[in-house]
Image (cartoon, helix red, strand yellow):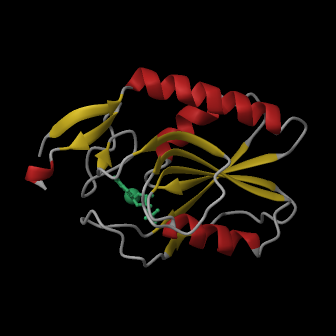
Amino acid sequence: MNVEKVLISADEIAAKLEEMGKAITADYQNKDLLIVGVLKGAFIVMADLARQIELPVEFDFMAVSSYGAATQTSGVVRILKDLDQEIAGRHVLIVEDIIDSGLTLNYLLKSLRVRRPESLEVAALLVKEGIERTPLDVKYTGFTIGPDFVIGYGLDYAGKFRNLPYIGVMDQSSL
Ligand code: IMP
Ligand code: MG
């Protein structure tokens, strides 16, 4: 398996997260913000984005089932780890690594909305374009990318490559 090319460099990601962090800081002034990371993919984005937010934020995590070793969505979403805390009346910001079909996020939003948060928004580093998906309202988007399968910066292929400091496109011939 090889990385075919660097799609988004570490510097470009850092600049984008700084921008997103500034927007979030401005939007949540005097609000009690809870950031929810979707494991495992979001752990790196969450860590780096959170350090660009100048507010006394709190953190929680959810884990949902995703692709396994395949590169196509199964359409099946399962909560493997739920939030530790109640979110009723809280301002909740979900942090995602990537939105592809939107199935994962759509399911998450539905299951969190019924808990009556004061607000519920989404920040995603990557959104794939040109894919038929449930219309989703993503308030903070980093980069819109094409349909290629990408790895790095939290994103895996078969559990690996999450620690690449950039977003890379995989050499499809080695899939
Ligand atoms: P969705 O439900 O189709 O939006 O898929 C979302 C999840 O699929 C993400 O949180 C990732 O775990 C995984 N995923 C989607 N596209 C990619 C990709 O290009 N590389 C690595 N993981 C991906
Ligand atoms: Mg994943």
Residue 97 in view here: yes
Taking the image as shown, residue 10 lies to the left or right of residue 96, namely left
Number of numbered discs overlaid on the protein picture: 0
Judged left or right of residue 30, residue 47 is left
Residue 132 in which image quadrant? bottom left
Q: Residue at x 67, y 73 (%)?
A: 110
Residue for point 78% across, 72% down: 115
- At horizontal 83% and vertical 57% (from top left) the residue drawn is 90
Q: Quadrant of the C terminus?
A: bottom left
Up the image or down, 163 lies above or below 81; here it is: above
Q: Is residue 82 visible?
A: no
**Residue 7: image location, x then y, percent:** 32, 34
Query: Which quarter of the figure has residue 23?
Result: top right
Between 32 and 128, the one lying in front of the other is: 128
Most foreground residue, 13 or 147: 147
Quarter of the render that holds ligand 1: bottom left
- The picture quadrant where one finds residue 3 is top left
Give residue 92's position: percent from left, percent from top: 74, 54
**Extreme-front residue of the structure:** 130
- Return the residue found at the far left: 173
Q: Position of residue 63 (x, y in %)?
A: 50, 64
The residue sitting at 50% across, 25% down in the picture is 14
x%, y% of residue 165?
35, 30
